[in-house]
Image (tube, rainbow, N blue to C red):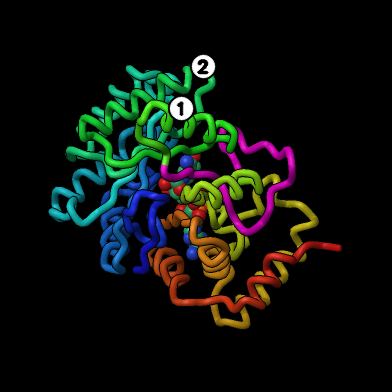
């Protein structure tokens, strides 16, 4: 699988990161193992989890995804070949939503323990916390880095101006800096002001910030739960914008021209749109994962990129 540099870290990571959110809860152990093996067999090394995954599901309580990854890595003996990302900051069980230093330290220890590893390769703040001074959060992350518990840090669900505050604080104190930001991002633009709960969309401002600071933008919910190709998945609220009709038409046209699916064109478009964009993929079946990984076999022409980018209803 092709690789890309993670921000300014000099670290090469897989061009498609596998989201492990439902592994060990909605996706049972056998299915999760099969998908992880399939991704690794395709050359993938970049896995994404979080301390809270997936406490909101019927069978999950939080920590399920990390525990499953830990068990799988132990059985496969492959930890050293992988690049593991996890997160802290959202609430689950009796843990509040917060990026306070003590909570960060405790949750990082729990994540390490659940996964049975000594270092997390990339540790994200899962959600900006405006109630904790940003200096305290960045210092706590720097302590984890100095202790060898995390190798790189990232942000998720942040506004661009808050990332700049964090960058300034870290630079001034000579602390480790965020190398990437994980945000909601797909081909269809979301209606301005649409409610996405506690998630934050990668708007133009954030994308420009990433390009100009060499931060990688990790795109989550890239396939909008399958809505691009599945009749059983209605277009999520906010994306059901009449203005998106033209965009969907061009997406499907381009897919027909290159013999790809609309999902594959979305992933290709994202990868080719900027060297700083890296999609997360998720799947619950072998066929879905194989389709998503297969996106790397296509290349869009400059003319197709231009048509995709400029498609808007008059
Ligand atoms: N930082 C954050 O706040 C945040 C938020 C959300 C997600 N994430 C991360 O991003 C990852 C992906 O998020 P997501 O689940 O929202 O991604 P998504 O791409 O929007 O949805 C993935 C789901 O879409 C369906 N799907 C995937 N490939 C398909 C295909 N080729 N054809 C048809 N349907 C397909 C599957 O649904 P079914 O399983 O129902 O079939 C799959 O579980 C997560 O695992 C997590 O690591 C981070």
> Which residue is found at the position 51% from the left and 64% from the top?
271
Q: Indicate whether residue 181 is drawn in magenta.
A: yes
Front in this rendered view, residue 296 or 179: 179
Percent position (x, y) of residue 8?
A: 40, 50
Front in this rendered view, residue 270 or 64: 270
- Look at discs 1 and 2 and give the one toward the viewer: 1
Q: Indicate whether residue 41 is drawn in magenta.
A: no
Percent position (x, y) of residue 245?
A: 76, 62
Q: Toward which corner of the image does residue 25 lie, by quadrant?
A: top left
Percent position (x, y) of residue 313?
A: 82, 62
- How far apart are labels 1 and 2 at the CA level? 16 Å
Q: Is residue 310 left or right of residue 62?
A: right
Residue range (magenta): 179-201
Q: Which mark is residue 131?
A: 2
- Which residue bears the numbered disc 1? 169
Q: Is residue 9 above or below residue 306?
A: above
- Residue 87 appears in view: yes
**Ligand 1 neighbours mark 1 (CB distance < 8 Å):** no
Q: Quadrant of the C terminus?
A: bottom right
Q: Is residue 94 above or below residue 220?
A: above
> Which residue is found at the position 46% from the left and 27% from the top?
169
Q: Is residue 44 left or right of residue 244?
A: left
Q: Helix, strand, or loop for circle 1?
A: helix
């Amino acid at each position: 699988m092709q690789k890309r540099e993670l921000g300014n870290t000099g670290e090469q990571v897989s061009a498609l990161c596998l989201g492990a959110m439902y592994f060990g809860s909605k996706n049972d152990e056998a299915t999760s193992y099969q998908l992880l093996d399939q991704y690794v067999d395709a050359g993938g090394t970049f896995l994404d989890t979080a301390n809270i995954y997936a406490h909101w599901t019927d069978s999950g309580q939080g920590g399920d995804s990390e525990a499953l990854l830990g068990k799988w890595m132990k059985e496969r003996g492959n930890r050293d070949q992988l690049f593991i990302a996890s997160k802290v900051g959202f609430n689950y069980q009796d843990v509040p939503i917060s990026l306070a230093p003590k909570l960060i330290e405790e949750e990082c220890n729990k994540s390490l323990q659940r996964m049975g590893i000594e270092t997390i390769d990339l540790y994200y703040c899962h959600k900006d916390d405006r109630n904790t001074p940003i200096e305290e959060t960045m210092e706590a992350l720097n302590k984890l880095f100095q202790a060898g518990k995390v190798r790189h840090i990232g942000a998720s669900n942040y506004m661009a101006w808050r990332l700049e505050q964090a960058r300034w604080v870290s630079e001034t104190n000579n602390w480790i800096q965020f190398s990437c930001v994980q945000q909601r991002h797909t081909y269809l633009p979301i209606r301005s002001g649409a409610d996405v709960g506690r998630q934050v969309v990668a708007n133009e401002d954030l994308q420009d910030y990433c390009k100009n600071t060499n931060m990688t933008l990790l795109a989550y919910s890239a396939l909008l739960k399958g809505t691009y190709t599945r009749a059983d998945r209605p277009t999520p609220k906010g994306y059901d914008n009449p203005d998106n009709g033209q965009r969907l038409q061009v997406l499907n046209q381009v897919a027909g021209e290159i013999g790809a699916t609309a999902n594959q064109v979305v992933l290709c478009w994202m990868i080719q749109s900027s060297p700083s964009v890296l999609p997360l993929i998720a799947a619950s079946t072998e066929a879905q994962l194989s389709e998503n990984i297969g996106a790397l076999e296509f290349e869009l022409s400059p003319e197709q990129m231009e048509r995709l980018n400029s498609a808007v209803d008059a």
